[in-house]
Image: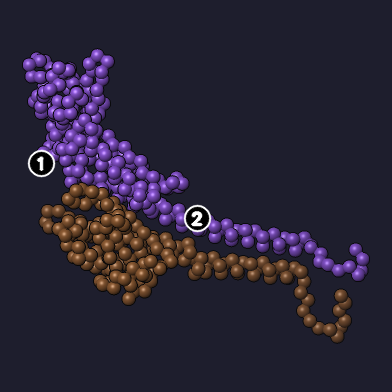
Chain colours: A brown, B purple
Amino acid sequence: MSFRENKKGFIFSLDATLGILVMMLVIAGVARAGGSELTYGQHGYLRLERYANDALELLYLTGNTDNIKFHSTIDNIENLLYIGQQALAENLAENQLRKILPNDIQFRLRIGPENNLRLDNVFPSAGNHPWWRSAFDNVKEIAAASRVSIFRPDNRFDIITLYVWRGSAI
Amino acid sequence: MKRDQRGFVLSGTALLLVLPAMLLTASCLKIVGMGGEAVSLQVTADKVYYTGRDLARVLENMWASNILADNRHTANARFDNLVDNYNVATGLLVNFTENWKLWTYYVQGDDVEYVYAGTYYCKVARGVGDNWFYYMDSYHWMADWNDITLRVQKIGDNLLITIYDFDPGADIWVVQPIDVYWGSTLIFDDVRSPTRGIHPTVGDSYQENGNITQLTASFNIQDPRGAARYSGSENLG
């Protein structure tokens, strides 16, 4: 290639090209590492899982005392179930979890095995259970936390499971 | 190289520029991969940690609710049931070891019988206040759970163990003295009926001093890959 005096333009050397290539790779790498998609992919689920575990743990740590003994929220729910007050137990669980979890986090609490549930239909708002069930069934990403508890009168162990997901409220 | 042949000449400087580009690319990919793995590990570690905490809490509740001292034999079966529940609920591997301190032993000829609390041959019942009764079916011939009854009283941090009853009953034809152990310590050697003179008998006591409990439950929880592990133990009673 020859360059005459009356021709003007940029000379793009191979070194410069490679230099730009390196820069582009660095910028692309940083953009990807700092991008919201990757950050969520790495930490979003972790946060969701911690929401579930921390919320369930709080049900054991919060409650009331009757001057003799501390009764956790889970104790109170179990007592209400023991005396057959399912609706009250459901309300208590809903109210407590709604207070604990942020508005963009939705939940479902279930006590007992699928074929013999002690408590179900604990969703962020009372009623609208079919809508919530549908939202639960169709959500793409769910985190769950589980605990085992003792239930009267037969002192049977049953599993308490809290599911949480990101979504809008009704 | 002829004049009409064209191409790039990869100079030393150009090569040095290519190398960092390759290194940076490889590093970025590695960082992304490690980040994902670290999060996965944190999720697993969280699950193991919370399960460990929960198991300790349930064990305390079991003791406080007298589920292990409800006058039924084979109290250890409740632990098996509990472990099964955790396996199902969490998918984690839960290993559990219970260690009741009281056990009895006797020998008759070649026949050696051990009776450990928590097994089929022992019923534990909670009495009024901080009293527990261990009904041992030491001789195994008749399942009557009353060959020897031991009372454990918690007095402050100490435990007072008393021979509450000794009643071979229908097993009278095989009666041999029974040794009673607290852990590895022989606390009553050759327990016999009251007429046997110097040997320990009903009413005799032994005090275990210090921060002592009747049962130690040890557990180990880990995920199936063995990446996260939680070990703990609860001293009960």
Q: Residue at 35% across / 49% down in the picture? A: B88
Q: Is residue A159 left or right of residue A140?
A: left
* Place of residue A21 in the rendered image (x, y in percent of width and height, measured from the top left): 68, 68
Few, some or many residues within 10 Å of mark 2 (<14, 14–19, 20+): few
Q: Residue at 26% across / 39% down in the picture? A: B77
Using the rendered view, name the quadrant where residue A24 is placed.
bottom right
* Place of residue B169 in the rendered image (x, y in percent of width and height, measured from the top left): 11, 23
* Place of residue B147 in the rendered image (x, y in percent of width and height, measured from the top left): 14, 25
Q: Residue at 33% across / 72% down in the picture? A: A131
Query: In the image, what residue type sits under mark 2?
Result: Glu
Q: Secondary structure at mark 1?
A: loop
Q: Is residue A29 above or below residue A157?
A: below
Q: Secondary structure at mark 2?
A: helix
Front-most of residues A147 and B198:
A147
Residue positioned most to the front? A115
Front-most of residues B127 and A64:
B127
Q: Specify whether residue B204 is in view.
A: no
Q: Specify whether residue A10 is in view.
A: yes
Q: Which mark is residue B37?
A: 2
Q: Residue at 79% across / 81% down in the picture? A: A9
Front-most of residues B111 and B125:
B111
The image quadrant where one finds the C terminus of chain B is: top left
The image quadrant where one finds the N terminus of chain B is: bottom right
**CA–CA distance in space, label 2 to label 1:** 52 Å
Disc 1 designates what residue?
B129
Few, some or many residues within 10 Å of mark 1 (<14, 14–19, 20+): few
* Place of residue A169 in the rendered image (x, y in percent of width and height, measured from the top left): 33, 74
